Amino acid sequence: MTAITIAGALKRFGSGVAVDDVSLDIAEGEFVALLGPSGCGKTTLLRLIAGFETLSAGSICFGDRLVAGEGAHVPPEKRKVAIVFQSYALWPHMTVAENVGYALRVRGLGKAERRIKIGEALSAVELSGFEARRPADLSGGQRQRVALARCLAMDPAVILLDEPLANLDVHLRASMEETFRAFHERTGATMVYVTHDQAEAMAMADRIAVMEKGRILQVADPATLYDRPTSEGVARFVGNGRVVDCVILGPAGGDQSRVQLFGAESLVRASIGAQASGSGRLALKPERLAIGESGFAARVRKAVFKGSHTLYEIEPEAAPGLLLPLPSNERLAIGEVVRVSVRGGWLLPAGAGAAPLAEAA
Ligand SMILES: Nc1ncnc2c1ncn2[C@@H]1O[C@H](COP(=O)(O)OP(=O)(O)OP(=O)(O)O)[C@@H](O)[C@H]1O
């Protein structure tokens, strides 16, 4: 397996910049997701890693080996990368075993060796016994697992995945997330996974790079991205967050600060770079708001029953026109005024930037 070092990667298409000065270190055996809205440059970055695009500036190394940049461009077939796309691109006339073993045959491996590698690869995706089936006789999820087995049999240094679950229905996606996770644990492969679906990225990746307009806004493990965003863009994009104005009253010990929010005082978490006083920007996740006895006053404006809970939209009395999502099991009437407390708001670092990123899907 191979570490990937991307340094100052730039990709221009004509006058447009698709990937803008991206630096990212991916450790050997790490599972990194590239997450962001449509057009943010994640597929282009993946294609640069694969070698399908040439860099306009910067460099990419696999381990110690320079594969792109400084006049070098190692072609895709020499990079030992395997790619899994949305469309599985299986040969319909070949059996599962033939599909998985095709590239091995082209490479000149003998029959016995091929059989072993095919067996191992199919076992890694839990498809042992499916060798003789044809793609038409498989479900969508099984086909995607054959595509995974095919790339595994190639013994790749790096596995790149471009929205591989986009064509599958919701139930299948959940079970395929499990398959990818198990596959990663079992193989220890270095994996880079492109998606615009944050739940998918959160469920699988060791770290997530959130991209916007060709740049990486933040790279962190899923919990850090969710709880400690460093920019307004990430705070909004991840976990359907909202960013609101508050007044910082002062530190409250540890990483806590006291803030005035919609006319009530709250304890929130603060980053090291957060200001000690003055006006601040507070990141709120819907499930960190709770209806109770204390807190700011807000009017219930909308209610959508979701089965396990009801998703309310509340309008703080101190901020007319601002609607905040709040999931709750309480039964509240539209128009009712409630008290809302903040549990675990996150005071953004000063200068976190107000660049808007498309709301999460
Ligand atoms: N071959 C190309 N020629 C010109 N512009 C391109 C080319 N490929 C990508 N772009 C542009 O580069 C930007 C980034 O595209 P890219 O496909 O990397 O985004 P993405 O985040 O993967 O989006 P999506 O999720 O929609 O696939 C877009 O503005 C796109 O139009």
Image (cartoon, rainbow, N blue to C red):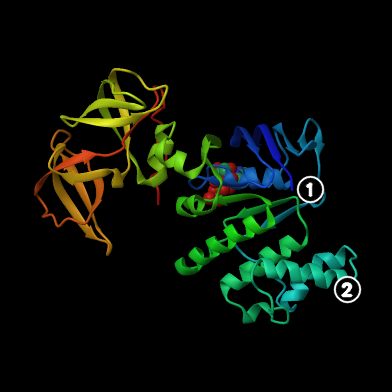
* Earlier residue among tags 1 and 2: 1
**On the rendered structure, is 113 left or right of 52?**
right
Vertical position of residue 79 compared to residue 136: above or below: above
Q: From this viewpoint, is residue 89 visible?
A: no
| Residue at screen point 89% across, 66% down | 109
Looking at the image, the residue that sits furthest to the front is 253
Residue 135 image label? none
| Amino acid on which the number 2 mark rests in the picture | Lys
Crowding near pointer 1: few (<14 within 10 Å), some, many (20+)?
A: some
Q: Does residue 192 appear in this view?
A: yes
Give the alpha-carbon distance from disc 1 to disc 2, as whole Å: 25 Å
Q: Position of residue 30 (x, y in %)?
A: 63, 46
Q: Quick check: is the Cβ at mark 1 less than 8 Å away from ligand 1? A: no
Q: Which one is nearer the viewer's eye here, 105 or 330?
A: 330
The foreground one among 12 and 188 is 188
Q: Which residue is mark 1?
A: 79
Q: Nearer the viewer, residue 237 or 122?
A: 122
Callout 1, which amino acid? Arg
The residue identified by callout 2 is: 111
Residue 328: % across, % down: 23, 53
Image point (79%, 36%), residue name? 64
Total marks shown come to: 2
The image quarter containing residue 55 is top right
Q: Residue drawn 76% across and 39% down?
A: 63
User: With 238 as the anchor, is 77 left or right in this view?
Assistant: right
Residue drawn at x 51%, y 42% as measured from the top left: 221
